[in-house]
Amino acid sequence: MKLIKDTEFGGERPLFASRDLRLENVIIREGESAIKECSNIEALDCRFDGNYPFWHVHGFRIERCYFDIGGRSALWYSDHLLMRDTVIDAPKMFREMSVLDLENVTLNDADEVFWRCNDLHLKNVVLHGGTYPFMFSRGIYVDGLESDSKYVFQYVKDVEIHNARITTKDAFWEVENVTVYDSVLDGEYLGWHSKNLRLINCHISGEQPLCYATDLVLENCTFDPSCDRAFEYSTLQADIRGSITNIKNPASGRIVADAIGSVTLDENIKAPTDCRILLRSSDF
């Protein structure tokens, strides 16, 4: 493997089509596509200021690096990435990629990141700001996520999440086959139009959660008092610990809670209208 260290590059495509290359303490200055059409690349303790540095790269490792704002759209159309201990201030990262393994990574402008990616493994990742992280991605495993981005995890499939703290709105819209464990989900309109969304040991905040959901499952979950008009037009099996403020017009299934503030069943309820709503000790 060729070693390049303690130097800098700028301009157009300075390392185009490189193979078996290790970069140490290298700065990529203003320019475009510095490491395009490359394979078997390692970057350690590097800084990226120019646009689009890693496009069409196959097999690469990035550790202890920094992507400045100018390094926007840095990782597209690439595969088999291992990224560790890296800070990213640039937006629109990770598009049309597969086989990504990230650990201890912070994205300070998480606008439109992780779009149309497959086979993601994330550990201890932080997302700040931006909109629509993970749009249209599938095959995601997360252990440790902190996010205040808006509209997170929309249109994703085949996802498993552990130990997340997500503050947002419209999270998990139109998802399919998603399971979330031991997490805090804070934001209105959670999980609308989802299919096979399963929440286990989660705490949920925000108004109108989990409406229009199909085959929704909740196990040992708690709800903030802000959660009114929950489960409207959803089919579900829900085990709620503690109290829920209001349940409105669930379509079918079974809901059990320790306490229920109120239930709204009106002329707008949709078939099959056979949802059983129970207090843990008796029929509601």
Image: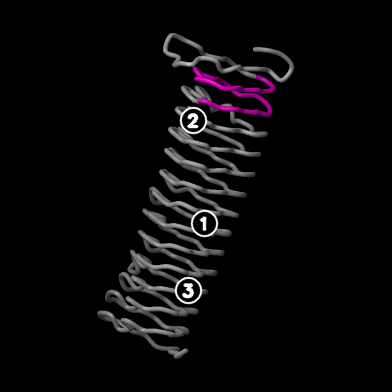
Q: Count the numbered circles shown.
A: 3
Residue at x 41% of width, y 63% of height: 89
Q: Earlier in the sequence, mark 3 or mark 1?
A: 3
Is 240 magenta? The answer is yes
Amino acid marked by disc 3: Cys
Q: Does residue 178 lie above or below 213 as drawn?
A: below
Is 249 magenta? The answer is yes
In terms of depth relative to the viewer, which is nearer, 219 or 23? 219
Instruction: Say if residue 150 shows up in the picture.
Output: yes
Q: Position of residue 47 (x, y in %)?
A: 42, 76
Label 2, label 3: how far apart the Cα atoms are? 42 Å
Residue 126 is tagged as: 1
Q: Earlier in the sequence, mark 1 or mark 2?
A: 1
Label 1, label 2: how far apart the Cα atoms are? 30 Å
Q: Does residue 25 lie above or below 215 as drawn?
A: below
From the image, which quarter does the C terminus lie in?
top right
- Kindly report which numbered mark, 2 or 3, lies closer to the viewer in this rendering: 2
Label 3, label 1: how far apart the Cα atoms are? 15 Å
Instruction: Say if residue 171 shows up in the picture.
Output: no
Amino acid marked by disc 2: Thr
Check disc 2 and report the residue beneath it: 214
Q: Position of residue 98 (x, y in %)?
A: 43, 62
| Residue range highlighted in magenta | 235-259
Amino acid marked by disc 1: Val
